[in-house]
Image (cartoon, grey):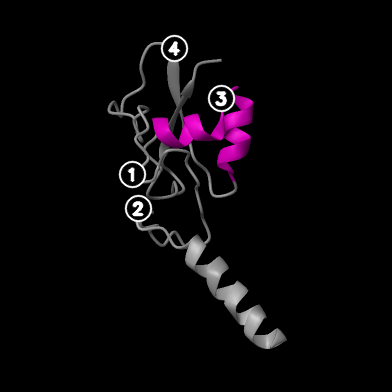
Amino acid sequence: MRILTTLLIALTLLAGCAREDAAEVPDRGDHAYVIAGASAGSGSSKPLVSSNPEPGAGETTVIFRPDDRLYRIAEEHGVTLDWLIRRNDLVDHPPRAGDDLIVPRR
């Protein structure tokens, strides 16, 4: 009886974790970015990515090096990791060495 109860609880928990509106997460190798509002059914008013790939007023670019980490770059420039990912359209792919990243001018 105890095994049946445990199995029933496990199945109930698993069924509650499945969501029909969950956005498909692409394979990013060793990288995983979790963006608030990135789900297809989220209804978020914030755009998922920037529509302007060029630096604007008060922005500049830095070259992403192999040993760089997005979190460190965000901290150095006083922005959130979420902002850096959205501004540089990195929601679906990580940056590669040599890529230009748009950051606020210091």
Which residue in the structure is indicated by mark 3?
Answer: 79
Does dot 3 land on a helix, a strand or a loop? loop
Which residue ends up furthest to the right in the rendered image? 2
Residue 72 lies in the magenta stretch: yes
Q: Earlier in the sequence, mark 1 or mark 2?
A: 2
* Few, some or many residues within 10 Å of mark 4 (<14, 14–19, 20+): few
Which residue in the structure is indicated by mark 2?
Answer: 21
Q: Earlier in the sequence, mark 4 or mark 1?
A: 1
Asked whether the residues under the numbered discs 1 and 2 touch, taking CB atoms below 8 Å apart as contact, a structural biologist would say yes
- In space, the residues marked 1 and 2 are separated at their CA atoms by 6 Å
The image position of residue 18, as x and y in percent, is 45, 63
Rendered-image quadrant of the C terminus? top right
Asked whether the residues under the numbered discs 3 and 2 touch, taking CB atoms below 8 Å apart as contact, a structural biologist would say no
The image position of residue 2, as x and y in percent, is 71, 85
Along the line of sight, the residue nearer the viewer: 7 or 49:
7
- In space, the residues marked 3 and 2 are separated at their CA atoms by 30 Å
Along the line of sight, the residue nearer the viewer: 56 or 48:
48
Q: Which mark is residue 58?
A: 4
Which dot, 3 or 4, sits closer to the camera? 3
User: Is 56 located above or below residue 98 in the figure?
Assistant: above
Q: Which mark is residue 41?
A: 1
Which dot, 2 or 4, sits closer to the camera? 2
* Range of magenta residues: 68-87
Which dot, 3 or 2, sits closer to the camera? 2
Residue at 53 percent across and 61 percent down: it is 30
* Few, some or many residues within 10 Å of mark 2 (<14, 14–19, 20+): few
Does dot 2 land on a helix, a strand or a loop? loop
Tell me: 101 left or right of 6.
left
User: Is 7 located above or below residue 16 in the figure?
Assistant: below
